[in-house]
Amino acid sequence: MSIRELAYALRGLITRGVVGKTDDTAETQVVDVTGRHGAKLTRIEVAQPYGFASNAPAGGLVLLLAVGGDAGDVVALPVGAPSSRMGKLAPGEVALYGLDGSRVHVKADGSIDIVSSKAVTARVPGVGAVEIAESFVRGRMESGEKFAATAGVAKIAAGGHYLAATSAGPRASAAIVIVPAEPAPDV
């Protein structure tokens, strides 16, 4: 093999591509890519890291690797979408984000900022769930206790009874008894 042939072979080991279509329905995500000089590559496996999944929009950029130097065995590194990337992170920060602006941002000071364009639901199996949406916050314990709040009303319910605070005043399903000590100070 001549030096020129070797140079061309090495140049072909790693190349860039633009994603046209993504198929994320099987065990492995595959993409159709337009590579160098307009080369069309179909059903290229995307090597995604464990514990993280994404389905980037068409037009995303990938690095293509020819495994073992074999142009017939190409894999794509995870797809990037520079035009919709969440940037301006401080050193040590991490973020997950979507096209609609929803994000989970772990900040360098240890705080976590969660933003959703629709709703955020947190579940703990065997315990309960909390949902935060545009117009309400609500939660339910698997043992049946629940709470909800919306503009002008906050309500808690347990054991078949409820207590509500409304703009018109308090409401309850039974007489309210004031006790000198909190029944559960950690709540």
Image (cartoon, grey):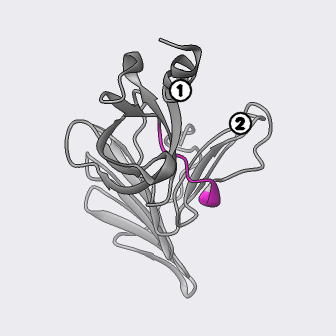
Crowdedness near tag 1: few (<14), some (14–19) or many (≥20) residues, C-alpha within 10 Å: few
- Callout 2, which amino acid? Glu
Question: Along the horizontal axis of the image, is 155 left or right of 141?
Answer: right
- Residue depicted at x 55% and y 88%: 168
Q: Residue furthest top?
A: 1
Q: Is residue 78 visible?
A: yes
Q: What label sits on residue 8 in the rendered view?
A: 1
**Helix, strand or loop status at disc 1:** helix
Mark 1 or 2: in front is 1
Closest to the observer, 102 or 149:
102
Q: Residue furthest left?
A: 26
Across and down, in percent, residue 80 comes to 54, 47
Across and down, in percent, residue 62 comes to 50, 43
Give the magenta part as a residue range. 78-84
From what the image shows, is residue 134 above or below residue 34? below
- Callout 1, which amino acid? Tyr
Q: Is residue 96 magenta?
A: no
Q: Is residue 80 magenta?
A: yes
Crowdedness near tag 2: few (<14), some (14–19) or many (≥20) residues, C-alpha within 10 Å: some
- Residue depicted at x 48% and y 44%: 79
Across and down, in percent, residue 89 comes to 75, 44
From what the image shows, is residue 58 above or below residue 23? below
Question: Along the horizontal axis of the image, is 136 left or right of 43?
Answer: right
From what the image shows, is residue 70 above or below residue 22? above
Tell me the CA gap for discs 1 and 2: 39 Å
Task: Give the residue number, with chain letter if any, for mark 2.
Answer: 93
Closest to the observer, 182 or 20:
20
Q: Residue furthest front?
A: 2
Question: Along the horizontal axis of the image, is 65 left or right of 95?
Answer: left
**Helix, strand or loop status at disc 2:** loop
Q: Is residue 154 visible?
A: no
